[in-house]
Amino acid sequence: MGKRINVLLVDDEPDFIESMAFWLKSKGCRVNSVNSGEEALRMIRNKPPDIVFLDILMPNMDGYTVIKLVREFNSTIPVIMMSAYEKESNVKKKTNFYGVFGFFNKEEEFSKAWAMLKSALKIEEENIEKNNPNIP
């Protein structure tokens, strides 16, 4: 991962966005953040990031709806669902068909989110190489 990673944070809690964005920027990421599902859909459609951290519980459009709609036009972008309230097992059941990479409990250390991010991008890179063997 030599290039700078573009991360999209989607969450309606400004304090969480601010702290996670700061942490990811300290790791060298370029971070964009939005506070609604509608804004996330616009951004992913117009300028897809390398990876998305998507909160589940948001007003108007929850994360489950967002991931469903994203998959209608982008089937490969890595998405990590986030919540401080939902259980991982529930998230897996509800997102099983949408290719969600993982779940980050917002009460855990950001280092866990970082490990998930690196794993997701490594797997995506390997899939691109496998599906395009002529790319050097």
Image (cartoon, rainbow, N blue to C red):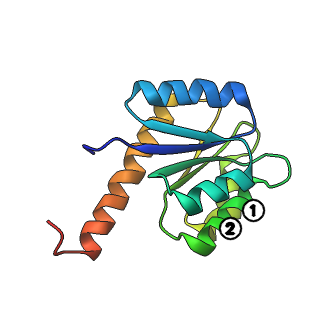
Q: Which of 8 and 87 is in front in this view?
A: 8
Q: Which residue is drawn at 25% across and 75% down?
A: 132
Residue 2 percent across, percent down from the top left: 24, 43
Mark 2: which secondary structure? Answer: helix
**From this viewpoint, which residue is outermost toward the right?**
60
Q: What residue type is labelled 1?
A: Thr
Query: Label 1: how many residues lie within 10 Å, few (<14), some (14-19) or many (20+)?
Result: few
Determine whether 130 is above or below 125 in the image.
below
Determine whether 48 is above or below 30 in the image.
below
Determine whether 89 is above or below 18 in the image.
below
Which image quadrant: the N terminus?
top left
Q: Which amino acid does label 2 sit on?
A: Lys
Mark 1: which secondary structure? Answer: helix
Judged left or right of residue 134, residue 39 is right
Quarter where residue 4 is shown: top left
Residue contact at pointers 2 and 1, CB within 8 angstroms: yes
Residue 29 percent across, percent down from the top left: 41, 35
Q: Which residue is drawn at 61% across and 39% down?
A: 33
Q: Nearer the viewer, residue 90 or 136?
A: 136
Q: Mark 1 points at which residue?
A: 65
For the residues labelled 2 and 1, the Cα–Cα distance comes to 5 Å
Which image quadrant: the C terminus?
bottom left
Quarter where residue 16 is shown: top right
Q: Mark 2 points at which residue?
A: 68
Residue 41 in sight in this render: yes
Residue 100 in sight in this render: no
